[in-house]
Image (cartoon, helix red, strand yellow):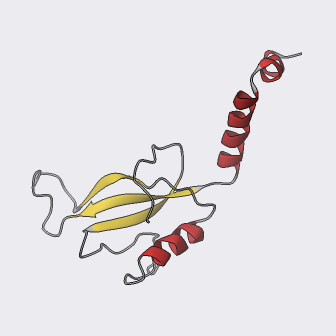
Amino acid sequence: MSVQSFLLIKGTKEDLRNIIKIFLLFSIMPYILEVQKFFVDGHNIHPEWNGKKEHIGYMNKIFRTKQEASDYYHEHNKDMRVINSENHWCSDWDPNTSLLYVVREYTGEYLKISPFS
């Protein structure tokens, strides 16, 4: 009997559930939505930074496919174009909130932004 087998047998049911969750999670290539803030005139606080978008965090929701993430976004943002309208899996920035969303592969990032309500 290997050490791994022994640990699995002697581990708690919770340990086994967590191992199965991790295996299943990474075996289906999950996706998440990254939240970014768009600055029309560049970053106000740090104008020396290049670009117009700043990473805010990742939404606390996991999707099985890119299309599922896109559909979820569109369901909650009907006034905006679909997230993949230009085949780059990135939404337009919302003129009211200055936020935009990007579909990303989930690789264990902290998911701290609340899902759409």
112 or 42, nearer to the observer: 112
Q: Quadrant of residue 97?
A: bottom left
- Residue 103 seen anywhere in this rendered image of the structure: yes
In the figure, 6 relative to 80: above or below? above
Could you tell whether 1 is left or right of 17 in the image? right
The picture places residue 40, in percent across and down from the top left corner, at: 17, 70
The picture places residue 45, in percent across and down from the top left corner, at: 10, 52
3 or 74, nearer to the observer: 74
- At horizontal 48% and vertical 53% (from top left) the residue drawn is 60
Could you tell whether 61 is left or right of 46 in the image? right
- At horizontal 70% and vertical 49% (from top left) the residue drawn is 27
Could you tell whether 42 is left or right of 23 in the image? left
- At horizontal 19% and vertical 65% (from top left) the residue drawn is 39
- Residue 87 seen anywhere in this rendered image of the structure: no
Could you tell whether 38 is left or right of 101 in the image? left
The picture places residue 56, in percent across and down from the top left corner, at: 31, 53
In the figure, 3 relative to 87: above or below? above
Q: Quadrant of the N terminus?
A: top right
The picture places residue 21, in percent across and down from the top left corner, at: 69, 42
**Badge count:** 0
